[in-house]
Structure formats: structure tokens, C-alpha cells
Image (cartoon, rainbow, N blue to C red):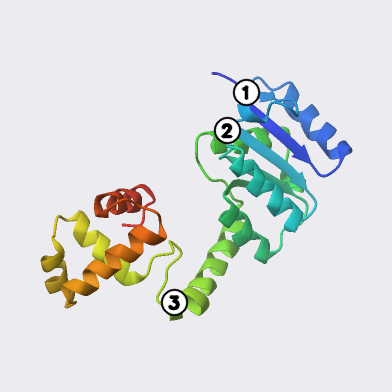
């Protein structure tokens, strides 16, 4: 099995040295130097708390092309969970639970594109998501995908092969409304046409 190249960032030198020491001799992991970020398959961030600086750095790692992120945190508040998922963190582990075997397991799962969150945190995250959906997005007719319910309905029917007139009939909309819905989707998400919109929605699991 090839070794997973890992970029490690820690809030302080002692934490960096400790985690690097845990991982350096593992046959599954290759710890990269600070100037080798472009080679990273996974970035691991070790922090005490998830503050705005940590979120900013996570965003910068994503912008630099590292799409698999793992966070090891000493403290995790409920509000942190949604923020971390929003940034794109796929692996989350408490420092108190970050044994070498557990950390390697989370890193390998992240490298494979699989999300790992402790079960109790997953329950809290789902509760947070539910509250945001009910109290913030729902009253505005939106979902976590950023698409309104009727936009999802229209895309599903486009994916089924229906034309504008058929969609309008099916949903009791005017054809102009259907066209406006599709135009709004493609403009907001910077998509080329309705086929591109359907492909985007399928790829992101929206329909």
C-alpha cells in the first residue's frame, strides 16, 4: 500500500512534534515538510479550540488544493461542528482520543474520501443541522444544498427528461416560471445550461 502524504499543522511546536512523532514511523503515512503542501493528500490540523483563525487556515488549505482535512481538537463546542463541516472537514477527532492507531485510521479514511466523526458528535451535528434547517433555511424555502425546494423539484424533472412545458404542467407552474427557476439555478451556481445543472445536482447528491 502506498503511503498517504500528510501535511501537518499544529497550534504550537510541542503539539506538532508530538503528533509528528506518532505518525513518522507509521508505514501508512508520510509526513511532509512545510514546503511540500502541494503534495498533500490529507492535511491534519491540531488545535485547542476551533476559532476563526483555525477556520481561516482550513479554508486556505482547501484553496491550496488539499481537499481532505482532518482536525484534532482539545475542545469542541456544538457551534464548531457545523462550521467545520461547512469548511469541508471530513475527519474529526478529540485530542484525548487521538492514539496513533486511531489517528492513522481517521487519516486513511479521509484519504479515501470517507468522513469520520465520533458518534456522540455526529448526533450533536445532526441536531444542529436540523435546527438550522427548521429555523433558518426552512422558513426561507431553502435547503442545505443552497437550492430551494421547487428548484430541486424542477431539476429532478429535467433529469427525468421532461421539457419546459411538461415540467410546467406537472408542477402547475407557468412555462415562464420554470424557465426563470432554471435561469436562477444556472446563474447562481455558474453553470452553463440545464444539462450542466442536472450533472452538478447529481454529482453533489442533490437529486
Residue topped by disc 2: 108
User: Residue 101: horizontal and vertical position, in percent?
Assistant: 67, 33
Callout 1 secondary element:
loop
Residue indicated by mark 1:
28
Q: Residues within 10 Å of mark 1 (few under 14, many from 20)?
A: some
In the image, is 91 to the left or to the right of 16? Answer: left
> Which residue is located at x 55 percent, y 34 percent?
111
Q: Which of marks 3 and 2 is nearer the N terminus?
A: 2
Label 1 or label 3, whichever comes before in sequence order: 1
Secondary structure, mark 3, is helix
Which numbered disc flags the more N-terminal residue, 2 or 1? Answer: 1
Query: Is residue 206 visible to us here?
Result: yes
The answer to the question of whether label 2 and label 1 lie on touching residues, with beta carbons closer than 8 A, is yes
Q: Nearer the viewer, residue 121 or 32?
A: 32
For residue 189, what is the image quadrant? bottom left
Provide the secondary structure element on which disc 2 rests. Answer: helix
Residue appearing at x 64%, y 41% in the figure: 61
Tell me the crowding category of disc 3: few under 14, some 14 to 19, or many 20 or more residues within 10 angstroms, Cα based.
some
Task: Give the label, 3 or 2, closer to the camera.
Answer: 3
Give the residue furthest to the right.
14
Q: Where is residue 202 in the image (x, y as percent from the top left)?
A: 32, 50
Whether residue 45 is situated above or below residue 86 in the rendered picture: above
Spatial distance from mark 1 to mark 3, Cα to Cα?
A: 44 Å
Discs 1/3, front: 3
Residue 136 against residue 2 in the figure, above or below: below
| Marker count (numbered) | 3
Q: Name the residue under label 3.
A: 138
Amino acid at each position: 500500500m502506498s503511503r498517504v502524504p500528510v501535511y501537518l499543522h499544529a497550534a504550537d511546536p510541542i503539539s506538532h512534534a508530538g503528533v509528528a512523532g506518532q505518525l513518522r514511523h507509521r508505514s501508512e503515512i508520510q509526513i511532509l515538510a512545510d514546503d511540500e503542501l502541494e503534495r498533500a493528500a490529507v492535511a491534519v490540523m491540531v488545535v485547542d479550540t476551533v476559532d476563526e483563525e483555525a477556520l481561516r487556515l482550513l479554508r486556505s488549505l482547501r484553496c491550496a488544493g488539499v481537499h481532505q482535512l482532518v482536525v484534532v481538537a482539545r475542545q469542541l463546542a456544538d457551534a464548531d461542528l457545523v462550521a467545520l463541516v461547512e469548511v469541508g472537514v471530513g475527519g474529526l477527532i478529540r485530542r484525548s482520543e487521538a492514539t496513533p492507531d486511531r489517528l492513522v485510521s481517521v487519516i486513511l479514511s479521509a484519504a479515501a474520501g470517507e468522513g469520520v466523526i465520533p458518534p456522540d458528535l455526529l448526533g450533536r451535528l445532526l441536531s444542529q443541522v436540523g435546527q438550522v434547517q427548521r429555523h433558518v433555511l426552512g422558513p426561507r424555502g431553502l435547503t442545505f444544498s443552497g437550492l430551494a425546494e421547487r428548484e430541486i423539484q424542477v431539476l429532478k424533472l429535467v433529469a427525468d427528461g421532461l421539457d419546459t412545458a411538461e415540467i410546467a404542467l406537472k408542477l402547475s407552474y407557468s412555462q415562464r416560471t420554470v424557465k426563470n427557476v432554471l435561469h436562477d439555478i444556472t446563474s447562481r451556481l455558474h453553470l452553463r445550461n440545464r444539462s450542466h445543472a442536472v450533472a452538478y445536482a447529481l454529482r453533489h447528491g442533490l437529486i
